């Protein structure tokens, strides 16, 4: 890891291996300083109440600390539960939420423009799109997620 990027796991959850540094450099730039913290539901609720006046845990919070510095806080317990609702694996949903948080840090607000950017990075890093097709860089091709029986 570089000194301008850190990941802290304050939970007992086993976290998937994700290309977080590559994502950070691609979306926010190499000079951007980012901290990603994984916290339990109680801590997520505490932070959400303090900074957003919402007394419930949330899957992700992102805080811009300065123009080139930010923090993303994720709650794996909540993400694991919600992943099924979005037809994603735990790893895919964490990846998507990190993209979402980074785009907020970059200045995006919820909009169709933000959704297109999320889709772009989701496809690039997690080989997924809305048609159920998986892209495999090493195979230089695409295969359907569910093959028809012949």
Image (cartoon, helix red, strand yellow):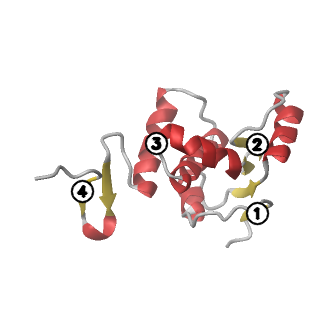
Q: Secondary structure at mark 2?
A: strand
Q: Secondary structure at mark 1?
A: loop
* Count of number-bearing discs: 4
- Indicate the quadrant where residue 33 lies: bottom right
Q: Residue at x 60, y 57 (%)?
A: 24
Work out whether mark 3 precedes mark 4 in sequence or the reverse, and give the earlier one: 3
Q: Quadrant of the N terminus?
A: bottom right
**Residue named by callout 4:** 143
Q: CA distance from mark 3 to mark 1?
A: 24 Å
**Residue in front for this viewpoint, 110 or 39:** 39
Tell me the crowding category of disc 2: few under 14, some 14 to 19, or many 20 or more residues within 10 angstroms, Cα based: some
The answer to the question of whether label 1 and label 2 lie on touching residues, with beta carbons closer than 8 A, is no
* 109 on left or right of 125: right
Q: Which element type, helix, strand or loop, lies under badge 3?
A: loop
Q: CA distance from mark 1 to mark 2?
A: 24 Å
Q: Residues within 10 Å of mark 4 (few under 14, many from 20)?
A: few
* Viewer-side label of 2, 4: 4
In this view, the residue farthest toward the left is 150
Q: Mark 1 or 2, which is nearer the eye?
A: 1
First in sequence: mark 3 or mark 1? 1
Mark 2–mark 3 Cα distance, whole angstroms, equals 27 Å
Query: Which residue is under mark 2?
Result: 63
Sequence-wise first label, 1 or 2: 1
Q: Position of residue 146 (x, y in %)?
A: 27, 50
Apparent side of residue 37 relative to residue 148 in the rendered image (left or right): right
Identify the residue under disc 1: 12
**Could you say whether the residue bearing mark 4 is in a helix, strand or loop?**
strand
Mark 4 touching mark 1, by CB under 8 A?
A: no
Q: Which residue was labeled with disc 3?
A: 87
* Residue 109 - label: none
């Amino acid at each position: 890891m570089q000194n301008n990027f850190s990941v802290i796991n304050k939970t007992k959850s086993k976290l998937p291996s994700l290309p977080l540094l590559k994502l950070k450099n691609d979306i926010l730039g190499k000079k951007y300083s980012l901290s990603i913290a994984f916290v339990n539901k109680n801590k997520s609720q505490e932070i959400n109440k303090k900074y957003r006046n919402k007394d419930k845990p949330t899957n992700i919070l992102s805080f811009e600390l300065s123009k080139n510095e930010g923090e993303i806080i994720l709650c794996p317990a909540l993400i694991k539960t919600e992943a099924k609702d979005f037809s994603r694996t735990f790893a895919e949903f964490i990846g998507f939420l990190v993209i979402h948080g980074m785009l907020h840090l970059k200045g995006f607000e919820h909009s169709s423009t933000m959704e297109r950017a999320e889709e772009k990075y989701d496809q690039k890093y997690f080989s997924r799109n809305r048609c159920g097709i998986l892209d495999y860089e090493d195979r230089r091709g695409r295969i359907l997620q569910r093959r028809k029986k012949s």
